[in-house]
Image: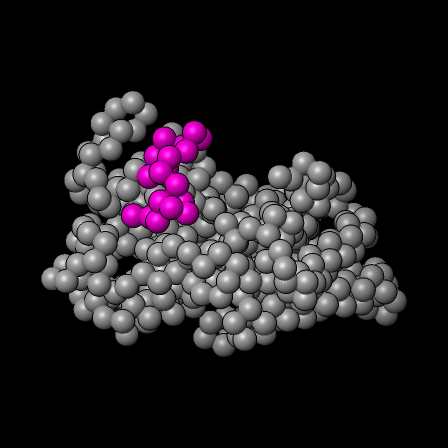
């Protein structure tokens, strides 16, 4: 029934738009990962500085659609269970390749594979048994991923590829990203050792990323498991799924674990895209994904738009003032994210902004956190308006219990 002169859409139509945006976002993620694979193949066949830069640019481009899909985590268990294969972080990069031990260290009480360096070693000890790593392929990486039940053993996904393209960022909270040379992939003029195995790892990780993204894109098609699981929940629980994902990404994950924690500790090791210094864009597009879902609108990589009945339409019909409030807060957050992007363009990337002595930079980051927290509070109001019952929004000690953060 129309309220305040605005006809509300059917909840099922809102769920369909949400699923359509998911399908488009994962398809775009797949296509940009395939473009990344082409650039990586060229880098490996011709390991020049130009080709290394092209591969890095392709990796950054691939992050744009993927980050906008992260709002589909939390409420959708199928997505949340899958996500660790493609976007797990932070990682103990010594599992994969050589590291600067003066800053990274040589061992860890928590991780027996802290400096296993699979690229340099064809034999590894895994769970007390010898693992044959002579051939670096997708199957090996899957065995290594979260090996020994250590979450920091990230062997697959975007961040493993990022590390291989950039290498460690040894600049701390000063300007500068990782600086791996192209010759680390040059078997005729090899630096870093084992250039053939490094190339194998990079190729296998990219192939596996494409496989995983293909699975998720298929899962949101008309007969896909993720879409069917969402629609089977019905209107009330389906809308709760949307709001759970929006609220949890907004609050506990993005405001807390990915932003406030690093700011509190002034620690670049807590930076999401820590090797490439691309965190400002990752945060921007994470926040953009939340806004996309609320507005029921997503702009694809090719410029086309996926749009339909939205959560905003539902809220507007029931409480126009709350819809205006939410739209305004989402815009405020996006403006705060843009301010970090603008700072990065001047050399003040996220790791520089969170430095202990950078008051103005800290303020920029805190403004982003404040925007995310404020929009989450408005999202909690929306839960009551659309009758979705109670939802469980992920928290973070950095926001909820700061004294526990060390």
**Residue 67 in picture, x, y percent from top left:** 52, 59
State the count of labels: 0
In this view, 158 is above or below 339: above
Q: Residue at x 75, y 46 (%)?
A: 388
Answer with the quarter of the image where residue 51 lies: bottom left
Whether residue 124 is situated above or below residue 235 in the rendered picture? above
Residue 345 shows in the view: yes
Q: Which residues are magenta?
A: 98-115
Report the residue that reaches farthest toward the top. Answer: 128
Q: Is residue 223 left or right of residue 294?
A: left
Q: Nearer the viewer, residue 7 or 390?
A: 390
Queried whether the magenta region covers residue 111, the answer comes back as yes
Residue 393 lies in quadrant: top right
Q: Is residue 151 toward the left or the right of residue 254 in the image?
A: left
Q: Looking at the rendering, in which quadrant would you find the C terminus?
A: top right
State the scheme by which the image is colored. one colour
Whole-percent x, y for residue 181 in the image: 28, 63
Is residue 283 visible in the rendered structure shown here? no
Residue 334 placement (x, y as % from top left): 66, 67
Q: Tell me the residue at 31%/45% (across/down).
A: 96
Looking at the image, which residue is at 47% across and 46% down?
90
Camera-side residue of 332 and 17: 332
**Magenta stretch holds residue 154:** no
Q: Quadrant of the N terminus?
A: bottom right
Q: Please, which residue is most extreme toward the right here? A: 4
Q: Is residue 66 left or right of residue 378?
A: left
Residue at image position (45%, 65%) is 176
* Prevailing SS of the magenta stretch: loop
Where is residue 297 drawn, in percent x and y?
Answer: 61, 68
């Amino acid at each position: 029934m129309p309220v305040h002169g605005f006809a509300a859409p059917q909840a099922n139509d809102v769920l369909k738009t949400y699923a359509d945006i998911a399908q488009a976002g994962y398809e775009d993620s797949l296509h940009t990962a395939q473009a990344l694979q082409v650039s990586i193949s060229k880098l490996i066949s011709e390991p020049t500085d130009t080709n290394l830069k092209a591969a890095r640019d392709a990796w950054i481009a691939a992050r744009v659609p993927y980050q906008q899909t992260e709002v589909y985590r939390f409420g959708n268990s199928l997505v949340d269970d899958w996500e660790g294969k493609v976007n797990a972080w932070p990682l103990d990069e010594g599992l994969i390749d050589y590291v600067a031990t003066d800053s990274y260290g040589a061992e860890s009480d928590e991780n027996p594979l802290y400096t296993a360096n699979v690229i340099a070693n064809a034999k590894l000890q895994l769970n007390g048994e010898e693992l044959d790593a002579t051939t670096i392929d997708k199957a090996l990486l899957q065995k290594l991923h979260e090996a020994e039940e250590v979450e920091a053993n990230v062997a697959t996904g975007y961040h493993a590829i990022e590390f291989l393209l950039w290498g460690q960022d040894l600049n701390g909270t000063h300007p500068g990203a990782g600086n791996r040379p192209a010759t680390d992939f040059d078997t005729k003029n090899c630096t870093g050792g084992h250039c053939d195995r490094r190339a194998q790892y990079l190729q296998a990780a990219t192939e596996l990323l494409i496989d995983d993204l293909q699975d998720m894109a298929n899962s949101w098609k008309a007969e896909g498991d993720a879409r069917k699981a969402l629609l089977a929940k019905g209107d009330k629980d389906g809308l709760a799924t949307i709001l759970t994902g929006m609220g949890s990404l907004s609050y506990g994950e993005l405001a807390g674990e990915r932003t406030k924690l690093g700011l509190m500790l002034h620690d670049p090791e807590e930076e999401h895209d820590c090797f490439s210094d691309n965190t400002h864009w990752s945060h921007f597009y994470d926040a953009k994904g939340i806004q996309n879902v609320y507005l029921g609108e997503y702009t694809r990589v090719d410029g086309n738009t996926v749009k339909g009945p939205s959560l905003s339409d539902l809220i507007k019909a029931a409480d126009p003032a709350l819809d205006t409030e939410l739209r305004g807060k989402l815009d405020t957050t996006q403006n705060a994210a843009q301010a970090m992007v603008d700072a990065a363009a001047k050399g003040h990337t996220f790791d520089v902004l969170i430095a202990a002595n950078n008051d103005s930079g800290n303020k920029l980051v805190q403004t982003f956190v404040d925007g995310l927290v404020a929009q989450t509070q408005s999202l909690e109001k929306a839960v009551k308006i659309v009758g979705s019952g109670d939802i469980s929004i992920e928290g973070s000690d950095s926001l909820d219990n700061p004294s526990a953060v060390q």
